[in-house]
Amino acid sequence: MSAPHTLPPQPTGRPARPGCRPTPRRGFTLLEAVFTVAILAIILAAAVPSYASYLARQRLRHVAELLEQDLRRDRTISVEEGRNIHLSFQSGAQWCWGSSRQGPCDCATGQPRCELGGVSARDHKGTLLQSGQGVLFEAGVGRAQGWTRVGISNDHNHQLYLDLGPLGRPQICGPDSRNAC
C-alpha cells in the first residue's frame, strides 16, 4: 500500500536563513502617508494667511521707500541745480506722485508733464496714498515748503507715513515701519 499523497507545508512568511534576521519592509503604509499629508495641510493652512500679510507689509514698505527715494532725489536736485523742484501728489484709489522742475505737475493726466518721473497705483495694487498737497523743495537750500505728512496704507490695515525734517530730509514712520519715529 502506498502512502497517502500529502502536499508539503506552505511557507507562512519568508524562510528564515540561518544566522540572519528577517529584513524589514521598505516604504510607507497608506495610513502613514495620509497622516503626513494631513499634518502638512494643517501647517500650510496656518502659514498662508501669515505669509500673505507679510507680503502685503513688504509691498507697503516698498512704496514708502520709493517715495522716500524720490523725496531725497528731488531735494538733492534742488540743492545741486539751484532750482525749485516740485513733487505733486494725487490721493485716492488711483493715487500717484510725480516730480518736475517746471512747476507743479499732474501725475494723473501727465499735463503738465512730470519730467523727473513718478509712481502710480497701477504698479502697486493694494496700496493707498493719503496726501494733502504737494511739496516744493527750495532752490539751492533744499528746504521743503508746503509739506504735509503723507500716509500710505494697504488693504491689510498696515500703515506707514512719511515726514520731512526741518531741512527736508524724509523719514518713514508708523507702526509697520522698521524705524521708531
Image (spheres, rainbow, N blue to C red):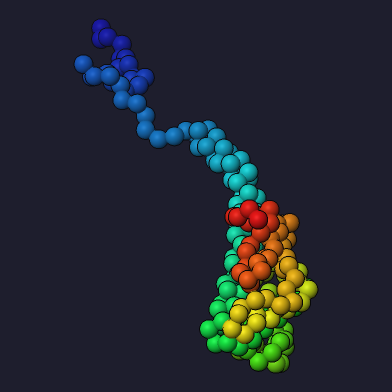
Rendered view: 165 above or below 37: below
The quadrant of the rendering that contains the C terminus is: bottom right
Question: Relative to 41, is 24 on the left or the right?
Answer: left
User: Residue 43, can we see it?
Assistant: yes
Q: Position of residue 37 (x, y in %)?
A: 54, 40
Residue that sits furthest to the top in the current view: 1
Q: Position of residue 35 (x, y in %)?
A: 55, 35
> Residue visible at 37% across and 29% down?
25
Give the quarter of the image for residue 128.
Answer: bottom right
Residue that sits furthest to the left in the current view: 19
Rendered view: 9 above or below 99: above
User: Residue 126, can we see it?
Assistant: no
Question: Relative to 163, is 34 on the left or the right?
Answer: left
Q: Position of residue 152 (x, y in %)?
A: 70, 65
Q: Nearer the viewer, residue 17 or 37?
A: 37
> Residue visible at 74% across and 77% down?
146
Question: Relative to 167, is 151 on the left or the right?
Answer: right
Q: Position of residue 145 (x, y in %)?
A: 71, 77
Q: Nearer the viewer, residue 35 or 77?
A: 77
Q: Nearer the viewer, residue 32 or 100?
A: 100
Give the quarter of the image for residue 20.
Answer: top left
> Residue visible at 67% across and 83% down?
86
Rendered view: 155 above or below 37: below
